[in-house]
Image: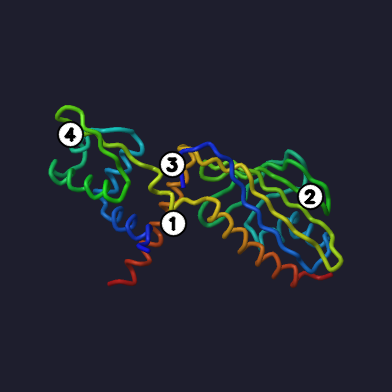
């Protein structure tokens, strides 16, 4: 892997879910439901709305880009110097919904690598502390 | 296969060595002398730490006259910062939580 390039990468996770799009849409857009499976947030399904996801490890800055109820939702996702876009697509199937999440816009240039390193390091030191706590 | 994480963990577990590496990351190329000035340890100790960092691929050296210049090799941290695999794992686990929630929700 070359950490010094300007290649854009994306992550895609997709799954067939045994529930209708309308129900999944609620889980994707209602703050109290979002909090249950993703993170604490002040999300609103309104284009241009700025919001945050907040985890134990820090916050993600977001802005809503597109909202098409029960079909598609996208927002920017900025954390640790990493700018990306998260897009949800809901497609009805005979038995439920095909749910697709694409997070795109990872650039693996040096700036990202350095920001990423800071994040990697936090995890790495947390892990190291665990290891050290176990080995007397 | 020898775990790349093990080598990085061991190399960066030493606080003096980690501080040297962090400084090279932040400030760019430095000579051994410049690094020693603020390292709080002797020049031979700094050189030894730099040797370990070099073996782990975390720094590269360049000789110029009697000086040796060191630069950080951020690419060596790639095993710790593979964003795409980290984010994939993150979203996979969130999808699991989402499915659990959907089962609990009414309708």
The residue carrying mark 3 is A114
Circle 4 residues within 10 Å: few <14, some 14–19, many ≥20: some
Residue at the front extreme, as displayed:
B1
Circle 3 residues within 10 Å: few <14, some 14–19, many ≥20: many
The disc, 3 or 1, on the residue closer to the chain's N-terminal end is 3
Q: Is residue B52 left or right of residue B84?
A: left
Q: Distance of mark 3 from mark 1, alpha carbons? A: 14 Å
SS category of the residue bearing label 3: helix
The residue carrying mark 1 is A123
Nearer mark to the viewer, of 1 and 4:
4
Q: Which mark is residue A11?
A: none
Residue under the image location 40 percent in, 62 percent down: A127
The residue carrying mark 4 is B33
Residue under the image location 71 percent in, 48 percent down: A87
Locate residue A66, reporting x and y percent.
77, 42
The residue carrying mark 2 is A72
Q: Are marks 3 and 2 in contact (CB under 8 Å)?
A: no
User: In the image, is residue B62 above or below residue A106?
Assistant: above
Residue A91 quadrant: bottom right
Locate residue B73, reporting x and y percent.
35, 41
Instruction: Please identify the quadrant where the C terminus of chain A is shown.
Output: bottom left
């Amino acid at each position: 892997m070359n950490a010094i390039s300007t290649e854009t990468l994306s992550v895609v996770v997709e799954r067939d879910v045994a529930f209708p799009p309308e129900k999944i849409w609620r889980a994707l857009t209602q703050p109290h439901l979002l909090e249950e499976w993703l993170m604490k947030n002040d999300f609103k399904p309104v284009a241009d709305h700025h919001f945050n996801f907040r985890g134990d490890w820090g916050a993600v800055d977001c802005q809503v880009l597109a909202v098409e109820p029960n079909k598609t939702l996208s927002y920017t996702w900025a954390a640790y110097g990493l700018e990306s876009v998260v897009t949800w697509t809901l497609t009805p199937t005979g038995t439920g919904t095909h749910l697709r999440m694409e997070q795109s816009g990872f650039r693996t240039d040096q700036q990202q690598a350095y920001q990423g390193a800071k994040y990697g390091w936090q995890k790495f030191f947390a892990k190291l502390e665990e290891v050290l706590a176990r080995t007397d | 296969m020898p775990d790349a994480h093990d080598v990085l963990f061991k190399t960066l577990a030493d606080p003096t060595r980690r501080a040297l590496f962090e400084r090279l990351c932040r400030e760019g190329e430095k000579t051994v002398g410049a690094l020693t000035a603020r390292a709080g340890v002797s020049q031979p100790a700094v050189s030894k730490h730099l040797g370990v960092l070099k073996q782990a691929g975390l720094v590269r050296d360049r000789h110029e006259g009697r000086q040796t210049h060191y630069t950080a090799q951020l690419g060596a941290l790639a095993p710790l910062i593979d964003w795409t695999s980290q984010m994939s794992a993150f979203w996979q686990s969130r999808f699991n939580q989402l499915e659990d929630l959907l089962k609990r929700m009414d309708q």
